[in-house]
Amino acid sequence: EDQVTQSPEALRLQEGESSSLNCSYTVSGLRGLFWYRQDPGKGPEFLFTLYSAGEEKEKERLKATLTKKESFLHITAPKPEDSATYLCAVQANTGFQKLVFGTGTRLLVSP
Amino acid sequence: NAGVTQTPKFQVLKTGQSMTLQCAQDMNHEYMSWYRQDPGMGLRLIHYSVGAGITDQGEVPNGYNVSRSTTEDFPLRLLSAAPSQTSVYFCASSLHPSETPDFGPGTRLLVL
């Protein structure tokens, strides 16, 4: 059974304090791993898709990396506007219509 | 493009009542899906469609019906609401099932 585990559940950072969010996964053949950002009361907003181990993608203060067992979302010098819940999801090669989501990491960045 | 739109934003139902959650997209996406999000759990797939006239069940389909008569619309029907269906419902769409889905703003449903 495909499974995604995210850690920590919640993370509190000071503005400028860099850190990483973890997404561990088991999947029967990875087609893609997705990172989304979700603000309170809103739908998930797409950030990155990673397809193979060793791949990295960056967007502003965010950088996503992928290994065969986990993905990291690195946040460099975060700002209060980066506060949100970050969701990780995997898509398998078979039954690729379905995304399997983790429970997310709630990030709070204090000024 | 308006993207993925959902109505209503919020709804309160009594147990046993029926309702339809609306989802529409104007991007000519073939693939559409419905997820529910509950506290402490990841988003879970309810039903999906790979094109007009084609639907299939996801991980948690019980208590929900769907149909896809047009490319643009994918309504989710609750025939007899139960308190266990209290949740936030998200519709998503993509051009192809293998592509990254775009999510709508969600419908918050409370069943009393």
Image (cartoon, coloured by chain):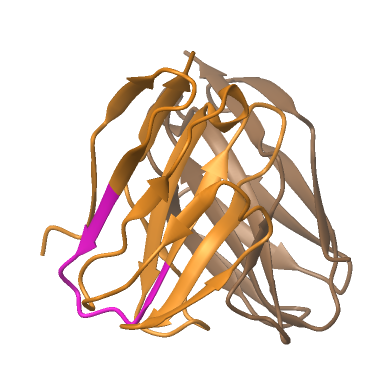
Chain colours: A brown, B orange
Find residue B15 and report its horizontal and vertical position in percent: 49, 21
Find residue B26 and report its horizontal and vertical position in percent: 15, 69
**Magenta span contains residue B27:** yes
Whether A18 is drawn above or below B71: the answer is above
The residue closer to the viewer here, A46 or A56, is A46
Give me the residue at 20% from left, 60% from top: B3
Give me the residue at 59% from left, 57% from top: B45
Residue A46 figure quarter: bottom left
Residue B54 figure quarter: bottom left
Left or right, A35 with respect to A60, comes to right
Whether A5 is drawn above or below A18: the answer is below
Count of residue discs: 0
Asked whether residue A77 is in view, the answer is: no
Find residue B73 and report its horizontal and vertical position in percent: 23, 66
Whether A48 is drawn above or below A36: the answer is below
**Magenta span contains residue A109:** no
Residue B32 figure quarter: bottom left
Left or right, B13 with respect to B82, comes to left
Left or right, B111 with respect to B43, comes to left
Asked whether residue B37 is in view, the answer is: yes
The magenta segment is B22-32
Find residue A67 and report its horizontal and vertical position in percent: 83, 71
The residue closer to the viewer here, B71 or B42, is B71
Whether B81 is drawn above or below B101: the answer is above
Left or right, A74 with respect to B94, comes to right
Give me the residue at 62% from left, 69% from top: A98
Q: Could you tell me which quadrant the N terminus of chain B lies in? A: bottom left
The residue closer to the viewer here, A20 or A90, is A90
The residue closer to the viewer here, A37 or B1, is B1
